[in-house]
């Protein structure tokens, strides 16, 4: 583990965390409190992306005993201007820097960033266990991506083919500009994998955050303790062999280097080219092994339930089901670790 890094300011232990609206209702707070959660991550947009809003929201959540670990800004996330070097790239980068400074001023330590030039891609919803509707992706049927109200169509979402070299150059330009601001502001940037992590969609390569080697190179370019990973287990499972390293070994590698800042906890039925998201206990990954590795290798950030299939037509039912599973798995991992430590100490 790296000493004196940004994670050193975070309390030890895996934190099962709620993803909530910053405008949470009394009922929302009650639901989270009753599940026994004490951390939340939030998202907003450019309208509210300022230090006063971040701080007032943090204080409001604190009144309910909930610590805001992270705050994302949809308008500086998945920005084609940044990824593809479009006309307003520098303006978007300045907006991102302002977001980081505002988080720092509000005392919020983390934000998620994704570097997809033409959004998240899905195909028609499909059924998982018991007929529950869930997100699906079939590469043979994929014809559009979406992000924050925008649609990106095939065959060329931005009118031409982009090269991998362009994507790497544009990432380097961005991360070299924002990493020093993240360090000065005391804010961690966790970069989310491409979703889905396929080589190219609609003329735009997904050559960086779609593989283990891509992440390694990207983090070396950033060369910053404040730039790491939002490790989406679901995306890693989507990629399967295409990721170049399995999810558990990747968790070990990056956690040992203090590079995992947040985890999205999600299972899928099988890897690309065609997958369906499913319940945490119903995919091809034994999700207990994920929790066990996170605990074993000292991860101390949040893990959130992610892309939960519709359960009984009520989003809260699926959330509660998933959180309960996560809490039980974490308790088991902690107890097993205590037993092993005790047995070792008695030898």
Image (cartoon, rainbow, N blue to C red):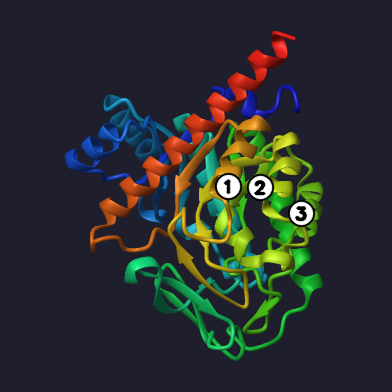
* Dot 1: element: helix
> Residue pushed farthest left?
26
Dot 1, crowdedness within 10 Å: few (<14), some or many (≥20)? Answer: many
Dots 1 and 3: beta carbons under 8 Å? Answer: no
Label 3: which secondary element = helix
Q: CA distance from mark 2 to mark 3?
A: 14 Å
> Seen in the image, is 217 located left or right of residue 200?
right
Residue 70 screen position, x and y as percent: 47, 40
Compared to residue 44, the image places residue 242 above or below, namely below
Please tell me which residue lies in front, 167 or 93.
Answer: 167
Task: Give the image location of residue 280, x and y in percent.
Answer: 46, 53
Residue on which the image places disc 1: 97
Residue 216 in view of the camera: yes
Within the image, what quadrant is residue 215 found in? bottom right
On the picture, is 175 further left or further right than 307?
right
Helix, strand or loop at label 2? It is: helix
Indicate which label's residue lies in the foreground, 2 or 3. Answer: 3
Q: Is residue 185 left or right of residue 322?
A: right
Please name the residue that numbered disc 2 is placed on: 178
Disc 3: which residue: 218
Q: Nearer the viewer, residue 136 or 347?
A: 347
- Residue 296 sits above or below residue 343 on the image: below
């Amino acid at each position: 583990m790296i000493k004196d890094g940004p994670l050193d300011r975070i309390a030890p232990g895996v934190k099962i965390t709620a993803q909530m609206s910053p405008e949470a209702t009394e009922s929302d707070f009650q639901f989270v409190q009753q599940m026994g959660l004490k951390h939340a991550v939030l998202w907003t947009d450019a309208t509210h992306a300022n230090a006063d809003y971040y701080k007032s929201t943090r204080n409001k959540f604190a009144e309910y005993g909930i610590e805001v670990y992270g705050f994302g800004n949809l308008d500086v996330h998945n920005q084609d201007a940044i990824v593809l070097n479009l006309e307003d790239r520098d303006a978007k980068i300045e907006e991102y820097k302002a977001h980081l400074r505002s988080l720092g001023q509000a005392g919020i330590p983390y934000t998620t960033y994704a570097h997809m030039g033409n959004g998240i891609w899905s195909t028609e919803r499909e059924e998982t266990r018991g007929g529950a509707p869930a997100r699906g992706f079939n590469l043979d049927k994929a014809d559009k991506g979406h992000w924050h109200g925008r649609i990106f169509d095939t065959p060329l979402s931005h009118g031409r083919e982009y090269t991998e070299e362009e994507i790497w150059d544009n990432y380097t330009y961005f991360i070299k500009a924002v990493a020093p601001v993240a360090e000065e502001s005391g804010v961690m940037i966790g970069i989310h994998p491409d979703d889905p992590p396929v080589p190219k969609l609609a003329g735009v390569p997904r050559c960086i955050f779609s593989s283990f080697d891509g992440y390694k190179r990207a983090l070396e370019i950033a060369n910053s303790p404040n730039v790491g990973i939002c490790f989406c287990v679901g995306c890693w499972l989507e990629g399967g062999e295409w990721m170049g390293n399995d999810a558990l070994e990747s968790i070990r590698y990056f956690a040992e280097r203090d590079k995992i800042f947040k985890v999205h906890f999600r299972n899928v039925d099988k890897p690309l080219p065609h997958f369906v998201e499913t319940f945490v206990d119903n995919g091809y990954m034994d999700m207990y092994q994920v929790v066990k590795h996170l605990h074993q290798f000292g991860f101390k950030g949040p893990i959130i339930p992610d892309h939960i299939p519709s359960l009984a037509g009520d989003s809260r039912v699926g959330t509660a089901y998933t959180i309960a599973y996560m809490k039980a798995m974490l308790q088991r991992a902690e107890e097993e670790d205590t037993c092993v430590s005790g047995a070792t100490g008695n030898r």
